[in-house]
Amino acid sequence: MKDIKKHWNTWVFWFTCIISAIVVYKILDNWTNVGDFISNFFEIIAPFLSGILIAYILYIPVSKLEESYLKSKLKFISKNSRKLSILLVYLIVLLLIVILINFILPVVIDSVIELTNNFQGYYKLAIDNYNNLQEDSIFKSQIVVDIVNNVQNFDLSQYINVNKIFDYVKGVVGVASSVFNIFVAIIVSVYILLERTDILEFLKKLGSAIFKKNTYDNLGRYFYNTNQIFFKFLASQFLDAIVVGILTTVVMSIMKVRYAPLLGFMIGLFNMIPYFGAIIAIVLSVLITAITGGVSQAIWLAIIVTIVQQIDANIINPKIVGDSLKISPLLVIFAVTIGGAYFGVLGMFLAVPVFAILKILINDYIDYKNSKKEQINS
């Protein structure tokens, strides 16, 4: 009987291996169709994924409001605390979007259009000023000359003009913001926030059924730490970007820098990328100001914006972020470099919280191995 069972298990094992090999071969042989299927599948569920992301981002303000509403002495408010908190948060988000669309975006778009229309003139003026420099100038070194020659041979008009800008915007809008997908995403996010307790309870039961108790407890701890890191990082970086964007826009407006709203918006946006974002934004702002307002204004801008960035880096950002991530500046630079190299701007933005999570995992692994050695030695 044991021999029959042993042979049966062997045959089942090899049969499973053969079937698996055939399935893998068919998948690779029809990879185009499989790729199309996967692509279509993700397009279909994109609104649901967007809804999950919206609910994830709005979870903290909704939960904080719900806690305050539960303490209310009014029975109607305490009884409907979750619904009221979700309603208020979505109304605030809607108000912010209306303010952005009606007051901020038009100014930024006007600056983009004006800069785009005048870019060829600014470009020619900069080249003429460069050609008029003395031959012994530091800017006339062979490296700079080669760069300028390459730039002169580059036809900017085919990439930078109003029609192209609007084509890019239309393409992005057409892909990312169909009315139906936005509507579905909002509905999904509302239902997730309403039923989040039941969803979490189900996931906990599923996890406890699949994993051993020790594994389940560790996964729960990692999930909690991951949430805390991402929430704190996203919220703090977004708030810090708004503060920096407003400050730099005000400073540039006082200095009468041309395209101040656009440059301030860009600096605030790039500031969300640790370390490198601020440097890139300042360099771009100084270059644009040097072309549009002269070298003297660009130098003053570089000095003042650098001071603002230092105030942000040493006072504002630590106050907002605190030591929540507990990650060294060297690791931040390394994380941003790796994230940007492999995943672009999004990688640079998300690299820090991802590496913070990896740091927790590695430290736990080291502590576990050391504890095992101590048990063996003792």
Image (cartoon, rainbow, N blue to C red):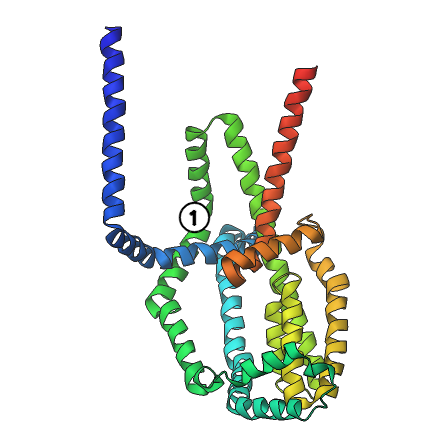
Q: Amino acid at mark 1?
A: Glu
Give above or below for 81 relative to 243. Answer: above
Q: At x 42% / y 30%, what residue is drawn?
A: 210
Give above or below for 26 relative to 74. Answer: above
Give the camera-side residue of 174 and 67: 174
Q: Secondary structure at mark 1?
A: loop
Give the camera-side residue of 34 and 364: 34
Q: At x 54% / y 77%, what residue is drawn?
A: 99
Q: Name the quarter where the N terminus is drawn.
A: top left
Give the tally of numbered discs.
Answer: 1
Query: What residue is disc 1 on?
Result: 195
Q: Residue 124 occupies which quadrant of the picture?
A: bottom right
The location of residue 355, given as percent across then percent down, is: 60, 48
Q: At x 46% / y 47%, what residue is drawn?
A: 196
Q: Residue 182 occupies which quadrant of the picture?
A: bottom left
- On the question of residue 68 being in view, the answer is no
Q: Is residue 91 left or right of residue 43?
A: right
The location of residue 114, given as percent across then percent down, is: 54, 89
- On the question of residue 362 being in view, the answer is yes
Q: Name the quarter where the C terminus is drawn.
A: top right
The location of residue 104, given as percent across then percent down, is: 56, 79
Give the camera-side residue of 110 and 199: 110
At label 1, counting other C-alpha atoms closer than 10 Å, the crowd grade (few under 14, some 14-19, many 20 or more) is few
Q: Is residue 295 left or right of residue 234?
A: right
The location of residue 93, given as percent across then percent down, is: 51, 67
